[in-house]
Image: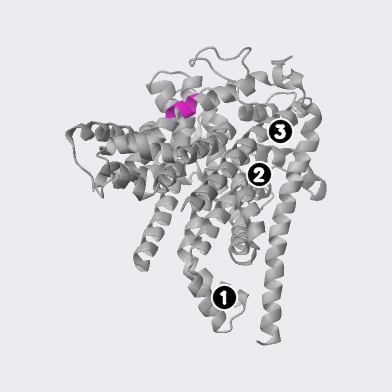
Amino acid sequence: MSGARKSKDRTATIMLWLVMALTCGMLALILAFLVSKGWSVLSWEFLTKKPRSMMTAGGISTPIVGTLQLVLVSMGFAFPVGVFTAVYLVEYARDDWFTRALRLAVRSLAGVPSVVFGLFGLSFFVIFMGFDPSLLSAGLTLGCLALPVIVGASESALLAVPRDYRDASYALGATQWQTIRKVVLPAAFPSIITGAILSVGRVAGETAPIIFTGAAFFAPRFAKSIFDQVMALPYHVLILATAGTNIEKTRPIQYGTVLVLLFFVLGMTMTGVLWRARLRIRQRAQR
Amino acid sequence: MRTSLKEDRIPRIAVMTIASLGVAIMLFILYSLVRDSIPILAHVTLSDLLFGTHWYPTYDPPEFGMLPLIAGSVSVTLLASLISLPISLALAVFLSEVCPAILREILKPVIEILGFFPSVVLGFIGMVVIAPWMVMNFNIMTGLNLLNASVLMGVMIIPIVTSLAEDSLNSVPKDIRDASFALGATRLETITRSVIPAALPGLMTASLLGVMRAIGETMVVLMAAGGAAMIPRSIMDPVRPLTSAIAAEMGETPFRSDHYFALFFAGLLLLLMTLALNMTALWIESRAKRLRS
């Protein structure tokens, strides 16, 4: 092998290592910056008190609870629909027009811009269905956005269930539905849950779909019904950082809110990713 | 394989009905956007909408020229792709071809988790870190501009493109690499002449899906792009992409006003652009699958 070719190869390898190192360094820098700025703001008070004095003081309990409520409503819709869509695609689907339309629709949904989901939610849930800007409208809009994520994760979970399980069940005389309900779904369930956890991470961090479907600029108390508006962590960051006259004054609250949001979203996704990795190792070991 | 019992048909139909909701939602999205954007065409011609250079929706009389918004979307997306696609592909090559297995087990999940980074947090970083830094180091009035938003949007799409590109490099059979090494090629030569060509459809799909995400991204541009509805002349100019115009203006727009319809039209444009990219990616995938078999 000639020296020039060898040194070229080595240079390329070094460059690739460098790109990776720089990327990781940037990431570490961003995280360190956000933690260092937000850490001192975090306290029990900050997490459990409501905002007061035109949101320039107090805590962020209303946006925290609002975000949790939005996650619950969106998952209440997207989880069952997503799992059953995957069940259809994996267990029932034939190669017909409906299956192709369904695959195309799920694929297209995954690419719809989040702000377009917001417009759809405004036009359909808020106005057409008459839900007004509310927890329900915003939650359902987020649910539509999470649907393709859950379908994708559930599909691969169902595909990973060995064929033998189904054959054994049929051999015992079970119907297809009994097989799905008693054998396939329980076997796939842990992986399905990890997919749901990942989509919770996505839903909790989204802002654009809820701006005009139910996120409140300010709400004095927690939402008592699904027809109330809610505050949400990402929207709280947006308005404190861009609207109003107290942008500089509320900077610490902004850093604190960003950090809480980040902990929640990254914590969720990390749980999902690590748990899924463990499940995959166990599945490999079983074979 | 399976017995078709009568009692088995009811659950099948039930599951199919629930599954059809996905199709219904996609159709409803298309329908809502088309229905609520058509009325604007009664007042403004299509070419004035698409090529008009003045976006003054709240003036009297209002002007709904979307060219500055479209130029904003396209310029941020292009610059972000220019920044992030080479980095993403390099990262993917590193992970799949160079990285030691143990390190890879750590880095892959880290990159995947990064893909969930809330965009509002990135936009916030643009406002509190990048913008002041730009004002300090360049002779400009505001640091909220095309470059700022593009860098952040690049950060946003790197994890997406890297994951997808790595998958496609990884699915290149090991035989191809072995054959190349056996012929005396170095690793670089193997990567550029054997592995990348074999994975090309997958790499193209990954890039297209990254671009698709960039066009639809809202919070980063809403917070960091500056928001001026003008056609940018330099990368330090503020821009107002379609997404940020919708997010910023829809809240203050009277229901079913011309402005409201115009913003839905902007949403329809976005939807069509992302659908076109998605379908192109799908087409490349299915063509590659057919060629392989």
Quarter of the figure with residue B47: top left
- The magenta-colored residue range is A73-77
Q: Amino acid at mark 2?
A: Pro
Camera-nearest label, 3 or 1: 1
The spot of residue A127 in percent (x, y) is 41, 21
Q: Is residue B60 shown in magenta?
A: no
At numbered mark 3, what does the secondary structure look like: helix, strand or loop? helix
Whether residue B73 is visible = no
A105 over B169 or under it: above or below: above
Instruction: From the image, tell me which residue sits under label 1.
Output: B190
Q: In terms of secondary structure, what is the magenta stretch mainly?
A: helix
Q: Which mark is residue B17?
A: none
Number of other residues with Cα within 10 Å of mark 3, as a class: few under 14, some 14 to 19, many 20 or more: many
What is the C-alpha distance between the residues marked 3 and 1?
44 Å
Q: A66 or B18, which is in the foreground?
A: B18
Q: Amino acid at mark 3?
A: Leu
| Residue at 61%, 28% in the rendered image | A235
B147 over A38 or under it: above or below: below
Q: A192 or A76, which is in the foreground?
A: A192
The residue most toward the front is: A172
Instruction: From the image, tell me which residue sits under label 2.
Output: B238
Q: Amino acid at mark 1?
A: Thr
Number of other residues with Cα within 10 Å of mark 1, as a class: few under 14, some 14 to 19, many 20 or more: many
Q: Are marks 2 and 1 on the same chain?
A: yes
At numbered mark 1, what does the secondary structure look like: helix, strand or loop? helix
Q: Where is the N terminus of chain A found, in terms of image quarters?
A: bottom right
Camera-nearest label, 3 or 2: 3
Judging from the image, the colouring scheme is one colour
Mark closer to the chain start, 2 or 1 = 1
> What chain does badge 2 belong to?
B
